[in-house]
Amino acid sequence: MAERSETSAADSNVAQSGAVSVDIYDQIYTLRGSNAAYIERLAELVDAKMRAVSSCGGTVDSLRVAVLAALNIADELVTLRARYDQLAEAHNQADRRIQSLADEAMRHRADSLGEMLDELIEDRRVG
């Protein structure tokens, strides 16, 4: 029973300090951050990636598994950043095209109004 109260006291201290305990590849890590749920989510992703790497490679060395998982995560990050950059550039091109069309419409409208004013002025001179 003494062990349970010590564990509960330790868990309570961790919770009060803004830390969260997570299990990644059968290792417990105590991490600090402002958003415990986010940290837990990240830990779950890392754990899942490590387990996927381990199941594919058959390696039991946790450091090797961690490095391979990190490389996989880095590859996903680079791929997503490249896709984001493509989408951002397409968005910028669309914005420039929309602005160009708006500018063209405004010039056309200004020209039309100018022509109407010229006709009005000419009519007043004649009349």
Image: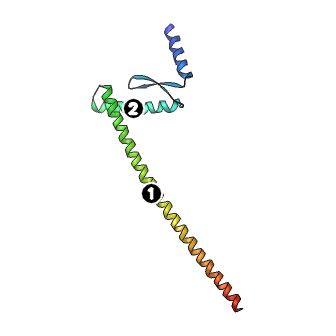
Depth order, front residue of 27/110: 110
Left or right position of 2 against 113: left
Q: Position of residue 20 (x, y in %)?
A: 50, 25
SS type, badge 2: helix
Q: Position of residue 46 (x, y in %)?
A: 40, 32
Q: CA distance from mark 2 to mark 1?
A: 33 Å
Disc on res. 29:
none
Crowdedness of circle 2 by 10 Å Cα count: few (<14), some, many (20+)? some
At x 45% / y 33%, what residue is drawn? 42
Look at label 2 and name its amino acid. Answer: Ala
Q: Depth-wise, is mark 2 or mark 1 nearer the camera?
A: 1
Q: Is residue 118 above or below residue 71?
A: below
Query: Extreme bottom residue here?
Result: 126
Query: Extreme left residue here?
Result: 58
| Residue 122 in view in this figure | yes
Look at label 1 and name its amino acid. Answer: Ala
Q: Which residue is mark 1?
A: 90
Classify the position of the C terminus by image quarter.
bottom right
Q: Position of residue 37 (x, y in %)?
A: 52, 31
Q: Is residue 121 above or below residue 78?
A: below
Q: Position of residue 34 (x, y in %)?
A: 54, 31
Disc on res. 48:
2
Q: Is residue 5 above or below residue 43?
A: above
Depth order, front residue of 37/34: 34
